[in-house]
Image (cartoon, helix red, strand yellow):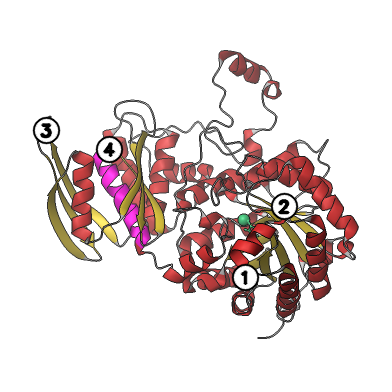
Amino acid sequence: MSKNTTTNVSGAQAADHDRIYIFDTTLRDGEQAPGATMTLEEKLQIAELLDEMGVDIIEAGFPIASNGDFEAVSEIAKRSKNSVIAGLARAIPADIDRAGEAVRHAGRGRIHTFVSTSPIHLAHQMKKSQEEVLEIVTQTVTQARNLIDDVEWSAMDATRTPLDYLARCTEAAIRAGATTINIPDTVGYSTPEDYCQLFKDLIEMVPDSDKVIFSTHCHNDLGLAVANSLAGVRGGARQVECTINGVGERAGNAALEEMVMSIRTRSDVLPYRTGIETTHLTKVSKIVSAAANFPVQYNKAIVGKNAFAHESGIHQDGVLKHAETYEIMTPESVGLKSTSLVMGKHSGRHAFKEKLKDFGYELGDNQFQEAFARFKDLADRKKNVYDEDIIALVDDEIGSAGDRIKLVELEVISKTGGEHRCYVKLDVEGDEVSVIEEGSGSVDAIFRAIKSAVGAQPRLVLYGVDAVTGGTDAQANAHVRLEMNDRIVSGRATEPDTLVATARAYLSAYNRLLVDRGAAAQGALASQSV
Ligand code: KIV
Ligand code: ZN
């Protein structure tokens, strides 16, 4: 493999002292959230949006984990226009070669290699001494630098690592040629004061620290990921690692939209700038939520449904008189558009397309036709079609594209104190399969019927339904989480009927179990809890 000699972010722009580089890891750390598996098409779409939005570095995946991950990273690398494309690698020669191979075709590629440094990880997971790990740092970073000029090294569980040892490892990584040094708060344990000081100390102690870019990577176990990342910036970090909607393992990662909007809104106390076009935030949040099957909580900062909704009379009155009374940023600045176009059964294709554009959706021809047909059907059944209905319908359409098993017919009979029976007809990759099953209730009967039709026994981890809008004719939004062979996947579906939504959400999760991510992916991730 030839060495990629393109300029890396760190070397070229280190001089621009107030510029914060945004490293998005939605497609790697974000995808590790239970149930958040995405298809190749979804990853390509998200990477394109991140690139367009001005993300500096996109961590596109973990190439050794599976052929699917490798393909996603190399395809994103080939298509990227401006962003640096990073591939993750453990401190293992085969991982590093595979990551190098995957990012080889990027205009600007990066190998991101990591090793644990904390005593608890060394003793129980790595079973190696500090000196052995130090040697591994030098060897692996050297190997990566022989493949590519842009190498990031991460000290996993850095915030629980003794400072002097962390400084020795960092020094070894810089000597071996690392261009970015990442100091992850892997378990979300740090506090803003400690994290800020950690960067100050390392930058002061480590020789040649001014030749590299230091990076934050914060998990949100104590709800401090964004605050810690901003504190890291104050301590001298100039790259922040984050994910859209804060999606990620356990409580997730620092949310990109919160980082970027904090820096933009509070430039008086955070005198930095990013290259992010913030008007793309709402759109990318929706697409990631639909692709990863991760609903965004209503009160989520910046992109939650209620983030700009003023319910109380006093607030509404103030905002109407002067928006800044209760608004510290405008909805438009994050790409939220208020539109007065009313949708009903007489609305045509053009109006529907305009509406989708306002919401930030760009559908391909076939997907648009399908979505429009569903909208017409909904408008026939429902008196008022609200924005939320259209968003739910289109998210559903995007989420179910490419499903290998589809619902053809469903009939449910439920009697008080009596039987609960479900007849289901499925299209299983072109073959029709019909089954009747009984259950303890209608939902149980539906799940049993689908399981017996597809012939697999996934375990139900979670089931929930909520209404998209108010009213008895509201659409139902059903969520299902399934587990099979150590994999957890989520599915959701929106339908005017609750039981149809339930059946389709179950199938949506089941279809995700069929997405070939390979057992290797799960094994590799489990062996190093990244
Ligand atoms: O949380 C973590 O330590 C990671 C590393 C792989 C950077 O995700
Ligand atoms: Zn992480």
Q: Are marks 3 and 4 in contact (CB under 8 Å)?
A: no
Q: Residue 345: give x, y in percent of width and height.
A: 32, 36
Counting residues from the N terminus, which is met first, the one under dot 3 or under dot 4? Answer: 3
- Does residue 460 lie above or below 60 as drawn? above
Query: In the image, residue 256 lies at what x, y percent?
Result: 64, 48
Name above or below for residue 138 compared with residue 250. below
Q: Is residue 432 above or below residue 375?
A: below
Q: Residue at x 57, y 45 (%)?
A: 245
* Residue 245 in the figure: left or right of residue 401: right
Specify the amino acid type for callout 2: Thr
In space, the residues marked 3 and 4 are separated at their CA atoms by 17 Å
Residue drawn at 73 percent across, 74 percent down: 141
- The amino acid sitting under disc 1 is Ala
- On the image, numbered disc 4 is attached to which residue? 498
Q: Main secondary structure of the magenta part?
A: helix
Instruction: Name the N-terminal-most of marks 2 and 1.
Output: 1
Q: Which residue is mark 1?
A: 89
Where is mark 2, residue-wise? Answer: 159
